[in-house]
Image: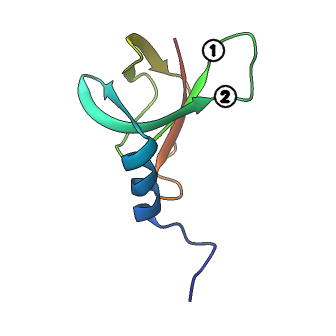
Amino acid sequence: MINLFVSNKEDFQFILDHLGKDVLINNQPVKAAISNSPLSTDVDDKIISTLAAISRGDIVHYNNEDWIILSEVNGQRYGRYRAYIRM
């Protein structure tokens, strides 16, 4: 039986394998899903989701530019880490 309230880490790994981008987080290669943030139109914030542990202040090299993780990461949620990044 499928439990809709329990996340499956393998599902997110499938998404990363097919849609994820290769980025560097603190000069370490990581696969991450990066999307636009719906919160702000004044700045180009993005959302990063990954299976690798991340924390506020980490530097993400994405799209030939360096970004910084702005938001606090309160551990793993739904099988992944998620944060806001800004250039």
Task: Give the spatial CA distance, label 2 vs label 1.
Answer: 8 Å
Say above or below: 72 vs 15. Answer: above
- Evaluate if marks 2 and 1 touch, with contact meaning CB atoms under 8 Å apart: no
Q: Quadrant of residue 65?
A: top left
- Give the x, y percent position of residue 56: 46, 28
Say above or below: 72 vs 63. Answer: below
Q: Quadrant of residue 38?
A: top right
- Give the x, y percent position of residue 20: 42, 40
Label 1, residues with CA under 10 Å away: few <14, some 14-19, many ≥20: few
- Say which amino acid is labelled 2: Ser
Of the numbered discs in the image, which one, if any, rests on residue 69?
none
- Give the x, y percent position of residue 84: 57, 28
Q: Secondary structure at mark 1?
A: loop
Residue at the disc numbered 2: 37
Residue 22 in view here: yes
Q: Which of pointers 2 and 1 lies earlier in the amino acid sequence?
A: 2
- Give the x, y percent position of residue 29: 25, 31
Residue 50 in view here: no
User: Would you say 38 lies left or right of 13 here?
Assistant: right
Say above or below: 74 vs 36. Answer: below
Most extreme residue toward the bottom, as rendered? 1
Residue at the disc numbered 1: 44
Most extreme residue toward the left, as rendered? 28
- Say which amino acid is labelled 1: Asp
- Residue at left 56%, top 72%? 6
- Residue at left 61%, top 20%? 45
Question: Which of the two residues, 10 or 83, is positioned nearer the viewer here?
Answer: 10
Label 2, residues with CA under 10 Å away: few <14, some 14-19, many ≥20: some
- Residue at left 59%, top 80%? 3
Q: Secondary structure at mark 2?
A: loop
**How is the protein colored in the picture?**
rainbow
Q: Quadrant of the N terminus?
A: bottom right
